[in-house]
Amino acid sequence: MKNFVKKLDCSFLIIIILCTFFFSYNVYARDNTAASFGSTEYGTDEDVRNATYAYYDAGYTSYGYTEPQKSDLWEKLYADVQFFSGHGNVNHIIFLYTGLIVANGGNYNFGEYGWKDVVGTDEVHWDADTILATYSSCYSSGNNESDYNSIAGRTMEEGCDVTVGFRQKINPYSATSWNKNYNEKLAEGYGVYDAIVYANSKNYLNNSVKQVNIFHENGVDYNMKIGKYRNSNSLQSLESNNILKNTNEKMTYSTNNICNAIKSINNDFDLKDYSVSESSGIIICPENGQIIDNEKYITMNYKLNDFITTSGYTIRIKNNTVTAIYDNTINSEILSSQKLNLSNPKILSETDLNLKKQEAIESVKNKYNNSNINIPENEITYDYVYDIENQKYKLVFSITTTSGSGDFETLGIENIEYIL
């Protein structure tokens, strides 16, 4: 078990090297605790660190676990706020040694991911303490649908006030950035819905992460705040980078309308310079009531020739009306100079690309000790990426892994990158 323990107070810092870490701060909530769970083996340890610090900033005694044991889950599943990041599927989420599964727990076989002694959602008294649980894993709120019997849906049905999950496979590159944006806004005192809108307003390399469900119990505000902000007043708008924020004009959704609006602030804008993706957005799922599903996102990622960046624009659309155009451009001058100087596009030949692909596959197999973990051929994708922060050209393979069968089939995505 790899855990860390820290306790922060206003006047001193004590570092205790153990297998758990937590932060202490006064907050007026039920049990005054938050708990985050993830896996170094499955690449979600950064998610745990970011969440643990964020919940401490929100005022909680905040615990973070990587590679938790089942006993760690049981000990902290009473926490007010809980965050889980690992491999999974509709009805479960797993870490290296344990996990959570819909209904009853026990010792189950997850194929090449191994036997795991897991906790069942129906065994936990979510209604006693927990106000928010977030599941960062593939299909945690349903497979392309809003599934009340998903891990996120069932957790709400069993008594958690609000739960958050994803209804698509999520790439860890994008999920880690999305989770950081989401948790940081919760830590600043914004509500759950507002924090998700903010996270969705950003550009990612894989934008399926914007397809999010919020399940909530009857009578509970799905935009509730956490920690020391539970009863605080509204904060400043998060729409600072929305180029439509100063206009009352309603813009009908069309490519021409969107492009003209962007050109009003960027004369050099040309749609052909962007990779464009579309995804449905936030779905609100009350315990008993009308599901709210009326929005989608268009994401435009700027390209340096064939290299995708996270610079660009995100467009939010509700009921066929453009409600926001978020300007997420980054270092435009650097990108422009790079485009002019990119005499060697660094694109690999088909032969070299296939060699790198096989190398990436072997790397994933080696990670799982040369196991027979399934790697579906049609779910191996690649992107040429320009890393703006580090000014590096990369080839990034995204490799979906599956193991187990039926209710215990588990999905994960491994990213293997090569500097070009």
Image: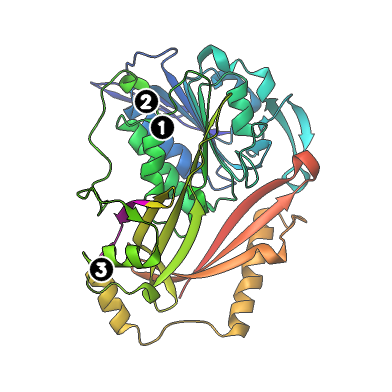
- Bin the neighbour count of mark 2 within 10 Å (Cα to Cα): few under 14, some 14-19, many 20 and up: many
**Residue nearest the observer in this picture, 127 or 66:** 127
Q: Is residue 30 left or right of residue 147?
A: left
Tell me the residue that label 3 is attached to.
Answer: 263
Q: Position of residue 229 (x, y in %)?
A: 31, 22
Q: CA distance from mark 1 to mark 3?
A: 33 Å
| Image quadrant in which the C terminus is located | bottom left
Where, by quadrant of the figure, is residue 258 drawn? bottom left
> Would residue 330 be counted in the magenta stretch?
yes
Residue type, numbered disc 3: Lys
Q: Magenta stretch: give its range.
A: 322-331
Q: Position of residue 124 (x, y in %)?
A: 63, 18
Q: Are marks 1 and 2 in contact (CB under 8 Å)?
A: yes
Q: Residue at x 29, y 21 (%)?
A: 9
Q: Nearer the viewer, mark 1 or mark 3?
A: 3
Where, by quadrant of the figure, is residue 326 drawn? bottom left
Tell me the residue that label 2 is attached to.
Answer: 225
| Image quadrant in which the N terminus is located | top right
Name the secondary structure under disc 3.
helix
Name the secondary structure under disc 2.
loop
Q: Residue at x 24, y 21 (%)?
A: 10
Residue type, numbered disc 1: Val
Q: Position of residue 33 (x, y in %)?
A: 44, 19
